[in-house]
Image (cartoon, helix red, strand yellow):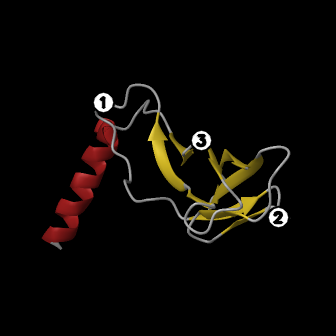
Amino acid sequence: MKVFSSLMLLVALAMALGCGTQNCPPQVLAVEPATGSANHTSIAPGNQLQFTAKWTITGNDQGCYYMQAMPSVTWTTSDAVNTTISATGLATCVNATSQPATITATEVNGQKATATLTCQ
């Protein structure tokens, strides 16, 4: 019972002090690289580009605590005829594109981030 009481006291104290997370900027999903290109006539890896989703923080985050795990995302492409994207973010140029394809990472809670891929 003492352990439970001590834990409840710590939780109450943390809530009263705000745990240093009040007024903290939110984590924002980002895709890197923001723009890229690959040559569809090359053999792998020349016709491929690896995209990565990550959390970014804008503003003053001093005293803020954030989960540092990589986001769990689903990848899609706006041009499925000329580009493919794997579950790990590896894009492949199948044909040349007249306009850049939009690569979208969608996080499990619905937050989205995009990048562009031009296939030459």
| Location of residue 56 in the rendering, given as x and y in whole percent from the top left corner | 47, 41
Structural distance between the alpha carbons of marks 1 and 2: 42 Å
Element under disc 2 = loop
| Location of residue 79 in the rendering, given as x and y in whole percent from the top left corner | 83, 57
Please indicate whether residue 85 sits to the left or right of residue 31 in the image.
right
Q: Which residue is mark 2?
A: 80
Element under disc 3 = loop
**What numbered label is drawn on residue 96?**
none
Residue plotted at (73% across, 62% down): 76
- Which class describes the residues within 10 Å of circle 2: few (<14), some (14-19), or many (20+)? few
- Which class describes the residues within 10 Å of circle 1: few (<14), some (14-19), or many (20+)? few
Residue 90 visible from this viewpoint: yes
| Location of residue 78 in the rendering, given as x and y in whole percent from the top left corner | 81, 55
Q: Which residue is mark 3?
A: 34
Please indicate whether residue 96 sits to the left or right of residue 116 in the image.
right
- Which class describes the residues within 10 Å of circle 3: few (<14), some (14-19), or many (20+)? some
Which of the two discs, 1 and 2, sits closer to the camera?
2
Q: Which residue is mark 1?
A: 62
Image quarter of the N terminus: bottom left
